[in-house]
């Protein structure tokens, strides 16, 4: 589907209803990871799913709201709302460009999203926290610096190690979910036609 869509088209009734569900998914997955003490975040699965289905504006808003709500309990999270919002926009655009209709394109998208996430994480962490926030990732970075790795390489290496697997898994789950969705349900979302058309082309 190549025709342009307006913001109003993206924010239809089902999209508005699914945003709080996506935020709840982010919260549940993020807290589960914290409980299990896994070296991941996985607090963006809902955002990425909405972004792929409903487009960049909805994805960006969902990402911003999700982190903003979590920051009520932990104010140090608030700066990361910017990253979540940008990633939601980027993923929504990639989906609209048919970058999630095959596994090969999915891999390319995952790499692009990971690169954006790493760069933005380094910038936000340095600007707001001097390079060390309250996450376990900063402990790893501090360890690398203590071992003799310069500050900037340590920042990028540390964020690369944490962000790449996290973003790959956080994108893979929505990718697999959407592959299992019926065309009747996909049609209700602004990006749904992209996936419907891709399925028709394969037949």
Image (cartoon, rainbow, N blue to C red):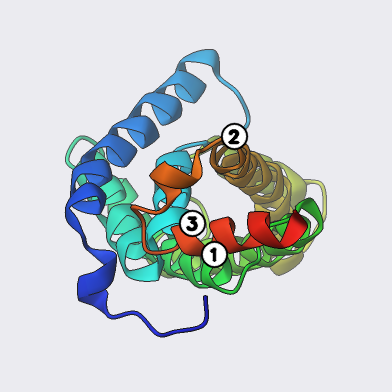
Mark yes or no: residue 11 visible. yes
Q: Earlier in the sequence, mark 1 or mark 2?
A: 2
15 left or right of 161 in image: left
- Please tell me the numbered disc located at residue 183: none
Front residue (pair 181, 61)? 181
Q: Secondary structure at mark 3?
A: helix
Q: Earlier in the sequence, mark 2 or mark 3?
A: 2
- Residue at 22% x, 40% y: name it: 20
200 left or right of 32 in image: right
Mark yes or no: residue 134 visible. no
159 left or right of 26 in image: right
- Residue at 26% x, 43% y: name it: 18
Neighbor class of circle 1 (other Cα within 10 Å; few <14, some 14-19, many 20+) is many
Q: CA distance from mark 1 to mark 2?
A: 30 Å
Seen as rendered, the residue at the extreme front is 203
Tag in front: 3 or 1:
1
Is 53 drawn above or below residue 122 in the view shown? above
Q: Earlier in the sequence, mark 3 or mark 1?
A: 3
Q: Quadrant of residue 153?
A: bottom right
Q: Circle 1 is placed at which residue position?
A: 194
Query: Residue 200: x, y in percent?
Result: 65, 58
113 left or right of 51 in image: right
Q: Quadrant of residue 185?
A: top left
Front residue (pair 97, 180)? 180
Query: Residue 8: x, y in percent?
Result: 20, 73
Q: Secondary structure at mark 1?
A: helix
Query: Residue 71: x, y in percent?
Result: 24, 44
Neighbor class of circle 2 (other Cα within 10 Å; few <14, some 14-19, many 20+) is many
Q: Circle 2 is placed at which residue position?
A: 40
Q: Circle 3 is placed at which residue position?
A: 52
- Residue at 43% x, 57% y: name it: 51
- Residue at 50% x, 70% y: name it: 90
């Amino acid at each position: 589907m190549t025709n342009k869509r307006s913001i109003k088209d993206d924010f239809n009734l089902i999209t508005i209803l699914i945003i709080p569900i996506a935020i709840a998914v982010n919260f549940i997955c993020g807290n589960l990871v914290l409980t299990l003490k896994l070296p991941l975040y996985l607090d963006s699965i809902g955002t990425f799913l909405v972004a792929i289905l409903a487009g960049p504006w909805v994805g960006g808003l969902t990402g911003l709201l999700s982190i903003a709500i979590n920051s009520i309990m932990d104010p140090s999270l608030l700066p990361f709302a910017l990253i979540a919002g940008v990633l939601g926009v980027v993923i929504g655009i990639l989906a609209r460009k048919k970058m999630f209709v095959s596994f090969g394109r999915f891999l390319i998208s995952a790499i692009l999203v990971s690169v954006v996430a790493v760069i933005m994480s380094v910038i936000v962490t340095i600007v707001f926290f001097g390079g060390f926030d309250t996450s376990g990732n900063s402990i790893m970075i501090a360890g690398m610096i203590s071992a003799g790795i310069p500050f900037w390489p340590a920042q990028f290496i540390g964020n690369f190690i944490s962000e790449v697997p996290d973003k790959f898994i956080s994108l893979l789950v929505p990718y697999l979910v959407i592959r299992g969705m019926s065309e009747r349900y996909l049609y209700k979302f602004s990006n749904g036609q992209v996936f419907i058309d891709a399925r028709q082309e394969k037949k």
